[in-house]
Amino acid sequence: MPSLLPTSPDALALAGLLGRAMARVEKRLRLQLQSELPPVQRLLEHVERYHGKMVRPYVAILSALASLPTPTAPASLDDATADSAVAEPHIVVACVCEMIHIATLVHDDVLDDADTRRQSATVNSLRGNEAAVILGDYLFSAAYHLCSQLDDQAVALLVAQVGMTLCAGELLQLHHRENFSLDEATYYTIVEKKTASLIAAACKLGASGAGEPTARRFYDFGIALGIAFQIQDDLLDLTGQERVVGKSLGKDLEKGKLTLPVIHHLAAASPPQRARSLEVLSLAAGDSTHRHGAEVVAALKSTGSIDHARHVAEKFVAKAKLALDPIPDSPAKRVLLGLADAVVARAF
Amino acid sequence: MPSLLPTSPDALALAGLLGRAMARVEKRLRLQLQSELPPVQRLLEHVERYHGKMVRPYVAILSALASLPTPTAPASLDDATADSAVAEPHIVVACVCEMIHIATLVHDDVLDDADTRRQSATVNSLRGNEAAVILGDYLFSAAYHLCSQLDDQAVALLVAQVGMTLCAGELLQLHHRENFSLDEATYYTIVEKKTASLIAAACKLGASGAGEPTARRFYDFGIALGIAFQIQDDLLDLTGQERVVGKSLGKDLEKGKLTLPVIHHLAAASPPQRARSLEVLSLAAGDSTHRHGAEVVAALKSTGSIDHARHVAEKFVAKAKLALDPIPDSPAKRVLLGLADAVVARAF
């Protein structure tokens, strides 16, 4: 899977440091996801393939670096000093957020009946729904187990709080399925809870060494970034290429999930167009052939709703960047801002 | 649902104290299971009905009382002093273990396609599999959130470890489904992991104030008790009355789960009987009409396999009691021993 990291000179300067930090994250993940029971071990090895864009680990590590007291750090530091700036708790936080994310992916794939994830067969398609549900539970517990090992108990408390929040967001979304009068405000509530809360936690915990006011800025950055991320995900589900995105697409229409372009379209359409779109959306809900997808996308384009959603996602990226305005300039900060741009520019 | 607490004079003497402790557990549970989102709140209220025998909270509270330094406590104490012997962390431990248990029940019901739990409709039958999977995830997170609030971080660490262990046990069981040559040793491994580990954690954490050697005895008590508990559950799935047990039965045969009576039968049967039983078990696996249940039970009885399993369960109860031998006699200890007897005597 391609990386979301920018290719700017800053990113190239940090590449070695970030690469070594990510290698530590992957090593720690592999260590935590080990079982002495061979059937369990095989399942854990399978989900290692789910590591994709690693957005949560990257923002955790970059937030740790960007919140260092020395503004020019770490590019000005030698390698060993820079590496030590990414302390073990940062690596653990990065792992924990990724594990919680993978746990939700494994369960999402069951709920979506999805076959493909990160170009691989899903656990449910390979081993059945039961194995996938229990494996997801295992991953949640393994994530909590890992963060309970840190001296700072605040990490486990925030991670568990976020676990509740993201489930609440998913339940709220489920409740509003096929609710064709869903408003934008409720959509943002859902997206903030189900996606942005975990990305924000990764940012905040990464920056926690810099004290609460600074950590809060990284949290706000993560919330806005996470909302932008989810809007782009929803856009890709409508207009992306399955081969490039690496997972089953068209699921939102099938599942009757109303996303930003659809909500905008239903509000902006003329009464006859709206009536027709409601009809098509109803037909698309529950239809696994996705044969109504093209008509829906054409309708969304006719009211500028795809562009609207893209524009909103960009506004959230701008809001994210603004939250970091008081943070001193540094290569790590610039890479973080570049990553925010990449979140809405991505095709995967 | 009837209680597993004995009706001995000791139990009657402790009834007030235990009743007040359980009221605190239920209050704490209700407090932790609250959401400002009405659709989430409604689901959380529904699972409150899942509180059944409350085995884990009872063993946590009784272990706390039985491990007090004063052997005759708490019957000899006045009410206020006795109540304070059940400290807030004990209440939290009791809640956390029950929440983890309820989370697994909610997911089990999805995996078993079960309609009824504790005489109520299951979440999956009422709101669909998706709501049930996400609600279970919410409950896991809420349990970890609650135990992360305790000063003693060892609680969260053990609870998360047990979360991994019980999922590993479930995955191992899944792996051996329809493995008609499953041996007793692997069955005990599965049962110890998927059921006994959480009951043992409740006992150990309840007794943790008394120091590691004492807490370890309560842990050993819980492991043996938990294995006995699961064997009895497996027996009830074969021979219980759905109305009395309060949940859908006959699921083990349908799901191809080999339990102790079946394992014993296949080892003890004559070759022709074994061949016929394998045929019937294969037919029963995947058959939701359960029409082969009576023939299987008759076959199990013909080799004394139901009695064998009952006998093994009783042996584990004896082993559990033996683990508490060094613990000074007290009313709370005697009630705990009585509860161990009730675990295998129960019809629900």
Image (cartoon, coloured by chain):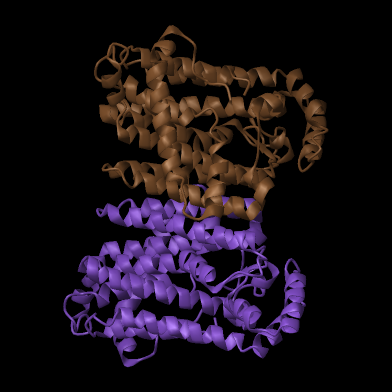
Chain colours: A brown, B purple
- Tell me residue B272's x, y (percent): 76, 83
Can you say whether B340 is above or below B191 in the image? below
Q: Quadrant of residue A65?
A: top left
Can you say whether A27 is above or below A63 in the image? below
Image check: A87 left or right of B71?
right
Residue at 46% from the left image edge and 19% from the top image edge: A319
The number of discs equals: 0
Residue at 21% from the left image edge and 70% from the top image edge: B84
- Tell me residue B267's x, y (percent): 63, 79
Can you say whether B113 is above or below A308 in the image? below
Could you tell me if residue A247 is visible in this image? yes
Image check: A282 left or right of A122?
right
Image check: A109 left or right of B47?
right
Residue at 56% from the left image edge and 48% from the top image edge: A42
Q: Residue A283 or A198: which is nearer the viewer?
A: A198
Q: Quadrant of the C terminus of chain B?
A: bottom right
Residue at 49% from the left image edge and 32% from the top image edge: A196
Could you tell me if residue B242 is visible in this image? no
Can you say whether A47 is above or below A57 in the image? below
Taking the view exactly as shown, the residue that stands out farthest to the bottom is B9
Taking the view exactly as shown, the residue that stands out farthest to the left is B70
- Tell me residue B104's x, y (percent): 52, 60
Taking the view exactly as shown, the residue that stands out farthest to the top is A9
- Tell me residue A208's x, y (percent): 30, 31
Q: Quadrant of residue B262?
A: bottom right
Image check: B96 left or right of B126?
left
